[in-house]
Image: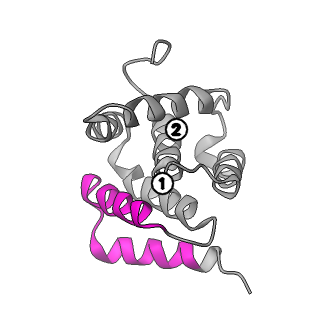
Amino acid sequence: MNDVPNSLSPQDCLVAVMVAVSASDENLRTTELVTIERVVNHLPIFAKYDQDRIRTVSQTVFDLYAEEDGLDALFGLIRDNLPEPLFETAYALACDVAAADGALGETEIRLLEEIRYELSISRLSAAAIERGARARHMVL
């Protein structure tokens, strides 16, 4: 984490949540990485975001995952640097990444539960966000 600042931009936080979900099962799938890239390329919140930051933020997530209390540290960074109005956005993006490969593994499900808890996402909001992600990633 040598070149990572002590704080993250709100966009960095959103990227970190998406990368954390993708890496949660220790298998970064291409569909999940493509989803992250698509999100960063198309959502208005990322309009002025330096896409080169994705690599740095990803490395931060990987470094934190390697530490014993790294997930707690990651959530601390996110809570400290992501404005509360974007908490539901972070959860929605996490759900989109988790749903991108068509299968939710146990570790992804547990991480989504942790994100809901850490970001104080209500059950009703979470259910709506999750249903939207399922609908967007359905296949025939």
Quadrant the C terminus occupies: bottom right
**Percent from the top left, x then y, of residue 139?**
71, 81
Report if residue 39 lies within the magenta region: no
Q: Amino acid at mark 2?
A: Gln
Which of the labelled discs sits on residue 83, or is there none?
A: none
Q: Which residues are magenta?
A: 105-134
Q: Nearer the viewer, residue 103 or 84?
A: 103
Q: Residues within 10 Å of mark 1 (few under 14, many from 20)?
A: some
- Residue 118 in view in this figure: yes
**Percent from the top left, x then y, of residue 34?**
71, 52
Q: Nearer the viewer, residue 106 or 47?
A: 106
Q: Residue at x 30, y 63 (%)?
A: 121
Q: Residue at x 37, y 71 (%)?
A: 126
Q: Earlier in the sequence, mark 2 or mark 1?
A: 2
Residue, disc 1: 25
Total count of labels: 2
Residue, disc 2: 11
**Percent from the top left, x then y, of residue 56?**
56, 25
- Judged left or right of residue 60, residue 77 is left
